[in-house]
Image (cartoon, grey):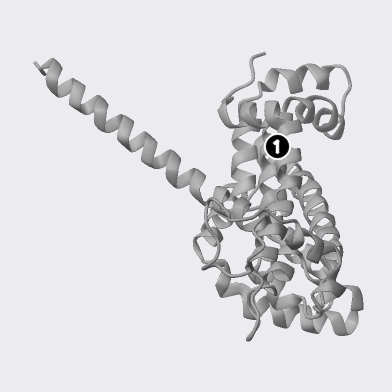
Amino acid sequence: MTSPRIRSGDNWWRHVLVIIAIGIAIFPPLYVITAAFNGDQTLSGSSLIPDSLSLDNFRLLFNPAEGGAEIFYLKWYWNSIWVAVLNAVFTVLIGALAAYAFSRFRFRGRRMGMLFLLLIQMFPGLLNLVAIYLIVLRTGEVIPPLGLNKLTALLVVYLAGAMSVNLWLMKGFFDSIPTELDESARVDGATPSQIFWGVILPLAVPVLSVIGMFAFVGTLNEFITASVLLETVDRYTLPLGLQSFINTNYQESWGSFAAGVLLAQFPAIIVFVFAQKYIISGLTQGSVKG
């Protein structure tokens, strides 16, 4: 039998580990916030408690003439929001249609198709960059809106991976919806499409919210694929545009970079606040009771 003294020591270490974990999670955002309001553009002059508070870093984002730099922050912001919203909407739609087919219909190659979609996720996305670049390059010669330096091409590339792990997550949720609901709707004369839009989809709002949130935030943060396909500064997304603050040879604006990063978090925060109830339900709810 474990002595009370040992149990007390175990609890003490648990508290220490929790405090360390919280500190690790909170320290980076706090450092970004203080760097954004610090007038010094260097990392050496930044600290958790800035010597003086200033809004100059934010002014530079919206008044690039003051810094003499080629800054299109609002354009980058719009490009990221536009691509992220459309990617989230179409990812949810395409994934839901595919998951419904795999969950409710029986056809040849169904099992192998699911395993194949899971298998291709085992390979790192970096392996596809050369092929993606060549495909977009050649496609742009025939269909210019789908060529290099086009946001539509970037969106299509993102949608190409819409049925990956998302399909498995949505299929598992659809499987938990009782098939008796489908049969009841079918007895009433509903078609498969009517069952999908009128019965299944409303019950699957929690998991659809989770998939949409992941797709939205993932697109806002994506950097590598966008850096390969987008070439001019005015077509950059936020990660690409913000990276231009810290990759120059003779001047690195870490303060403006931190200010831009801080403002870039608001779309994800707003989406999470409004969809919080559905997201939590989608992550914790394993079945739908009939």
Please state if 97 lies on the left or on the right of 168 as rendered: right
Quadrant of the rendering where the N terminus is positioned: top left
- Res 36 seen here: yes
Residue under the image location 65 percent in, 80 percent down: 251
Q: Is residue 268 above or below residue 124?
A: above
Q: In front: 187, or 34?
A: 34
Residue bearing the label numbered 1: 272
Q: Is residue 69 above or below residue 20?
A: below
Residue 68 place in picture, x, y as percent? 82, 79
Please state if 260 lies on the left or on the right of 11 as rendered: right
Residue 221 place in picture, x, y as percent? 66, 58
Residue under the image location 20 percent in, 21 percent down: 8
Residue under the image location 44 percent in, 39 percent down: 22
Please state if 150 lies on the left or on the right of 105 as rendered: right
Q: In front: 170, or 6?
A: 6
Please state if 30 lies on the left or on the right of 183 as rendered: left
